[in-house]
Image (spheres, grey):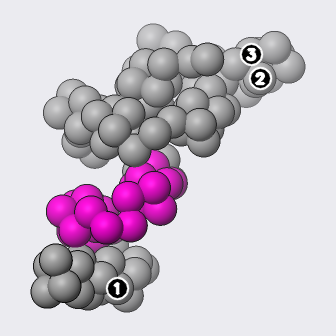
């Protein structure tokens, strides 16, 4: 299985690997960084997901595609429904990329607040 941290870091921008679309073969498409990341994050545990997000953000905070961040945080939160800090971190990340997800971010914070009150 592919290492999630490596797959996540491979999504960061790197102009040296860019190729014109007409040069992309089926083999290259199957090994494309986004597909490798999707496979790795699908089967990763929450610890690996959070670690890979932290590493990618430390290296290039804006470089990781929003779709990858959203998916990774979503999967981590589903695996850790009682982790208030993780839900707040996911909410803060959603708010960093526009108002489209503000309601979801509000729900994550409200869930985290309920966890803190009950815990």
Q: Give the SS element for disc 2.
A: helix
Position in image of residue 64 (x %, y %):
38, 41
**Closer mark to the observer between disc 3 and disc 2:** 2
Spatial distance from mark 3 to mark 2, Cα to Cα? 6 Å
Image quadrant for the N terminus?
A: top right
Does residue 74 appear in the picture of this structure?
A: no
| Magenta stretch bounds | 70-94
Position in image of residue 58 (x %, y %):
17, 33
Whether residue 31 appears in magenta in the rendering, the answer is no
Up-down relation of residue 107 to residue 57 (above or below):
below
* Mark 2 lies on residue: 30
* Mark 1 lies on residue: 107
In the image: residue 20, left or right of residue 113: right
Badge 3 density bin: few <14, some 14–19, many ≥20, Cα 10 Å: few
Of residue 50 and residue 98, the one placed in the foreground of this image is 50
Q: Give the SS element for disc 3.
A: helix
Report the predominant secondary structure element of the magenta stretch: helix
* Mark 3 lies on residue: 28
Q: N-terminal of the two: label 3 or label 1?
A: 3
Up-down relation of residue 39 to residue 105 (above or below):
above
């Amino acid at each position: 299985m592919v290492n999630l941290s490596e797959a996540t870091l491979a999504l960061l921008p790197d102009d040296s690997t860019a190729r014109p679309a007409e040069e992309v073969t089926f083999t290259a498409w199957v090994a494309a960084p986004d597909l490798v990341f999707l496979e790795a994050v699908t089967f990763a545990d929450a610890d690996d997901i959070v670690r890979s997000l932290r590493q990618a953000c430390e290296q290039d905070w804006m470089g990781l595609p929003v779709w990858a961040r959203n998916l990774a945080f979503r999967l981590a939160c589903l695996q850790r429904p009682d982790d208030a800090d993780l839900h707040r971190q996911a909410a803060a990340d959603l708010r960093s990329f526009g108002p489209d997800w503000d309601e979801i971010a509000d729900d994550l914070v409200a869930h985290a607040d309920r966890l803190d009150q009950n815990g």
